Amino acid sequence: MPSLESAGLNDINVITNKISIKDEIKSLFKYVGFRDTVGMLFGFIRLYIARPADRRLIKEMFVKPKGIIDYIGHGIYAGRK
């Protein structure tokens, strides 16, 4: 993966922040709306219960490496050419 320096940037400032799950959920409700968010959740649960093929896929989607939360976040990267 190329670095910021190899892209020709200097005077680089990097700000990283961890993601708060609680804040992400609140943001989802605010952006999508309570009714649509709950509708998505119930649709997801209905698929999980009713369709075995989807159940296997959903289980695979939610397998996460240990400690992954320590690495999930967002950042702002800026530099000057």
Image (tube, rainbow, N blue to C red):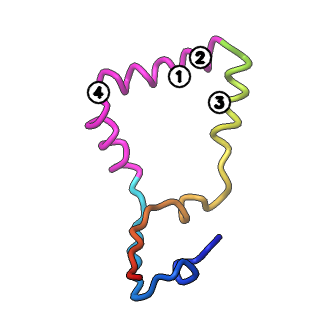
Q: Which residue is mark 1?
A: 44
Q: Are marks 1 and 2 in contact (CB under 8 Å)?
A: yes
Give the structural element (helix, strand or loop) at label 3: helix
Count of marks placed on residues: 4
Quadrant in which residue 71 is drawn: bottom right
The local crowd at label 1, few if under 14, some if 14 to 19, many if 20 or more residues have their Cα within 10 Å, is some
Real-space Cα distance between discs 1 and 3?
9 Å
Judge the density around disc 3: few (<14), some (14-19), many (≥20) Cα neighbours within 10 Å: some
Q: Which residue is mark 2?
A: 47
Residue at left 44%, top 87%?
10
Gap in angstroms between the C-alphas marked 4 and 2? 20 Å
Q: Is residue 20 above or below residue 77?
A: above
- Magenta residues (range): 21-50
Q: Is residue 5 magenta?
A: no
Q: Amino acid at mark 2?
A: Leu
Q: In x, y percent, where is residue 33?
A: 28, 28
Circles 1, 3 touching at the beta carbon (< 8 Å): yes
x%, y% of residue 43? 49, 17
Look at mark 4 in the image and give the residue it sits on. Answer: 34
Residue at 68 percent across and 23 percent down: it is 55
Dots 2, 3 in contact, CB < 8 A: yes
The percent position of residue 81, horizontal first and vertical second, equals 41, 82
On residue 52, the disc is: none
In the picture provided, is 53 more to the left or to the right than 69?
A: right
